[in-house]
Image (spheres, grey):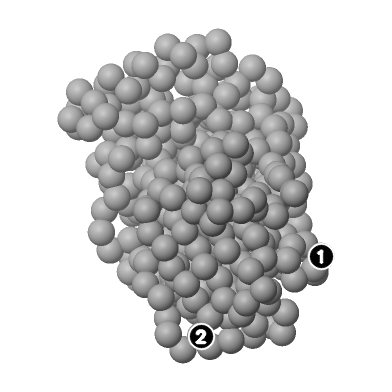
Amino acid sequence: MLEQIIAAFQKIYHCDPDFVLRSPGRINLIGEHTDYNEGFVFPLAIKYAQWLAIRANGMQEVKLHSLDLDAESVFSLTDFSEKGEGWIRYPQGIAFMLSQDNYSLTGWDGLLSGDLPIGAGLSSSAALEMVVARAFSLLGGYSWDPKKMALLAQKTENQWVGMNCGIMDQLISGCGEAGKAVLIDCRSLDLSSYMLPAGTVIVVMDTMVKHSLVASAYNERRAQCMEGAKFFGRQVLRDVSIDEFAARKDQLPELVMRRCQHVLSENLRTLEAAKCMEENDPERLGRLMNESHASLQNDFEVSCAELDIMAYESQKLDGCYGARMTGGGFGGCAIALVQADKAECFQSDISEIYQKRTGIKPNIFITEGAQGTSVVYSK
Ligand code: GLA
């Protein structure tokens, strides 16, 4: 990938890049739709990433070529009144937010490419935001603080792009650890990393479907969680205990009650998952993943037919400890915790079953925890 991106940069810009950077996508082991409730999530950065080759251009603008989309775009670093469309919104939004925070912005020419599937629910936009933030910090000469930049990238999504996401995707893209999954407390932003249980791997299974209305359904879920917290006189569901909820849940509107039920139980499952990792207990971890899927399907209602087929068919297969949808939902990927020596067989079986039941060929791969945003080449 590195040679390929350097060669492509030379072809387009007729010179060498100063730096090549990468920022990975993610899957979430457990802890879904909990981040914006200031709860717990347990993601890992994956081996696929957004790559960016850059060279300072001495101007007050960024020129960015996307190899995969075969598109080019230029934006100013002094005038943000013309808002770009599509993929360029993310880099431009990061530049805007940096300028709002009084960071000095240095112009660059860049070539963007990657092996991270776009729109598959693996956080390609968060990876893009973080790799661009790294580029500005490198050329601007300010130290790289991934947590601070993840917050800035989240603000870009919320205020520039209009997606009301939580902090998980940007934070794990910036702070991923090789070989580890990272438990994140989304209130304190404290991170603790854990190895998967011995002899297990994570299989990622892309359903290849993306249903519409994802952003509006996501924002609606967020609002319902806030309504639930308000009922209990709190700002966020993190501060509502499961006992308090059980005592008064019948007074809540039914839909809001089920949304809260998911978030509160998912937080407990996520903390328990950390114990399973410590105690090297894949069976219990798998059961928690299965419960998480059912809760997302029935109470939070963010699954879809294809994700259900992928998760439930996986759960039946030999060597699979547990499986669930991962990410925001309504399509994208499911994941399974699988016995390492059965993983090859598992992948071909689930691929065949899914294709038979849906007529769609899935994209299936094994991943382990990967390092977060990094500089992989400097001239
Ligand atoms: C999307 C959002 C995240 C998180 C997940 C659901 O990926 O970007 O912030 O809320 O959905 O867990």
Q: Residue at x 69, y 32 (%)?
A: 179
Report how far apart the C-alphas of labels 1 and 2 lie in the structure. Answer: 25 Å
Q: Position of residue 355 (x, y in %)?
A: 24, 26
The local crowd at label 2, few if under 14, some if 14 to 19, many if 20 or more residues have their Cα within 10 Å, is some
Mark 1 vs mark 2: in front: 2
Considering the numbered disc 2 on the image, is that residue within a helix, a strand or a loop?
A: loop
Quarter of the image with the N terminus is: top right
Residue type at numbered disc 1: Ser
Q: Residue at x 55, y 17 (%)?
A: 339
**Residue 80, numbered circle:** 2
Q: Residue at x 47, y 72 (%)?
A: 74
Q: Quadrant of residue 197?
A: top right
Query: Looking at the image, is mark 1 or mark 2 earlier in the sequence?
Result: 2
Q: Which residue is mark 1?
A: 143
Q: Residue at x 52, y 68 (%)?
A: 63
- Residue 205 can be seen, yes or no: yes
